[in-house]
Image (cartoon, rainbow, N blue to C red):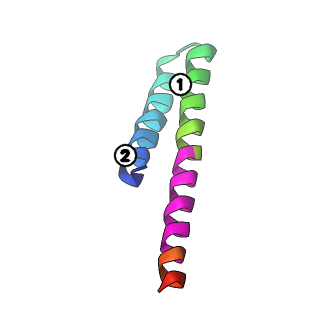
Amino acid sequence: MDLKTLTTAIRSHWEALKAGRDAGQSSTELAVITGALLLGAGLLIFAIKSKLLEKIGIINGG
C-alpha cells in the first residue's frame, strides 16, 4: 500500500466531511464519509506497520 495515496485519500475524505457538515448534509451521508475516513485511517496504520516491519527485517537480516 502506498502511504501517499492513503494519506491523500484520508485528507480528501476529511475535507468532504468538513464541507458536508457546513453544507448541512444528512446524518447518513456524514456517517458514510466518516466510515470511509476511519477505514482509510486503519489502512494507513496497517501500511505504516507493514513498512516498519519490513525495515526491521532488513536491518535484522543484514
Q: Residue at x 58, y 37 (%)?
A: 39
Q: Which residue is mark 1?
A: 21
Q: Amino acid at mark 2?
A: Thr
Q: Residue at x 53, y 26 (%)?
A: 33
Is residue 32 depicted above or below 5 in this figure? above
Q: How many residues crowd mark 2 within 10 Å: few (<14), some (14–19), many (20+)?
A: few
At mark 2, the secondary structure is: helix
Position in image of residue 52 (x %, y %)? 53, 68
Disc 1 to disc 2, C-alpha distance: 24 Å
On the rendered structure, is 50 left or right of 16?
Answer: right
Residue 28 counted in the magenta span: no
Q: Nearer the viewer, mark 1 or mark 2?
A: 2
Residue 50 counted in the magenta span: yes
On the rendered structure, is 39 left or right of 55?
Answer: right
Q: Amino acid at mark 1?
A: Arg
Residue 5: which numbered mark, if any? Answer: 2
Position in image of residue 16 (x %, y %)? 44, 29
Among numbered discs 1 and 2, the one appearing first in the sequence: 2
On the rendered structure, is 11 left or right of 43?
Answer: left
Q: How many residues crowd mark 1 within 10 Å: few (<14), some (14–19), many (20+)?
A: some
Residue 53: which numbered mark, if any? Answer: none
Q: Residue at x 47, y 86 (%)?
A: 62
Q: Residue at x 57, y 22 (%)?
A: 32
Give the dominant element type of the magenta stretch: helix, strand or loop: helix
Magenta range is: 43-56
Disc tally is 2
Is residue 44 depicted above or below 18 in this figure? below
12 or 3, which lies in front?
Answer: 3
